[in-house]
Image: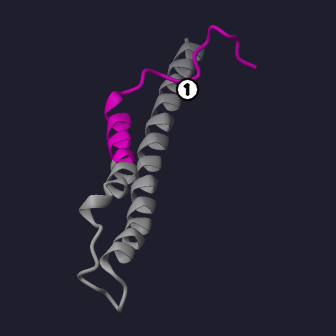
Amino acid sequence: MSSPDVPTRGVGRSGPYIVAGILLAVAVVVPLLVPAYSSDQPRLAGFPFFYWYQMLWVPITAALVGISYRLVTREDRRRRDAVQETRSGEQER
């Protein structure tokens, strides 16, 4: 059991978190811009543009969320490994 003053994660880099935030913001904000896609034409397999554009965002959003998840978990793993290496080095002394 670790004591409260021993960190469980190393220092984080802001890059992966910023990229993940931007990807998630795109996945949320773009479908909310309804005037950009509120039209009937062009039709795809008989469906108006309004409907198939929204359905197109389902796999796009899934991909963006998946990429964000991978970025954040990879950074978290790197931070945990940094602390583990520090602890191993201290124990070898």
Q: At 30% from the left edge and 67% from the top edge, which residue is drawn?
A: 38
Residue 11 screen position, x and y as percent: 43, 21
26 or 89, which lies in front? 26
Q: At 30% from the left edge and 77% from the top edge, which residue is drawn?
A: 49
Counting other residues with Cα less than 10 Å from the Cα at mark 1, is it few (<14), some (14-19), or many (20 or more)?
Answer: some
Q: Give the mark count.
A: 1
**Magenta stretch: residue 30 in it?**
no
Q: At 28% from the left edge and 86% from the top edge, which residue is drawn?
A: 43
Task: Give the quadrant of residue 37.
Answer: bottom left
Q: At 48% from the left edge and 22% from the top edge, which residue is drawn?
A: 10
Residue 67, relative to residue 71: is it above or below?
A: below
70 or 10, which lies in front? 70
**Which residue corresponds to mark 1?**
84
Residue extending farthest bottom: 45
As helix, strand or loop, the secondary structure at mark 1 comes to helix
The boundaries of the magenta stretch are 1-25
Residue 84, relative to residue 40: is it above or below?
A: above
Residue 17 screen position, x and y as percent: 38, 35
Residue 84 screen position, x and y as percent: 55, 26
Residue 3, relative to residue 25: is it above or below?
A: above
Residue 28, relative to residue 60: is it above or below?
A: above
Q: What residue type is labelled 1?
A: Gln
Q: Where the N terminus falls, by quadrant?
A: top right
Residue 16 screen position, x and y as percent: 35, 37
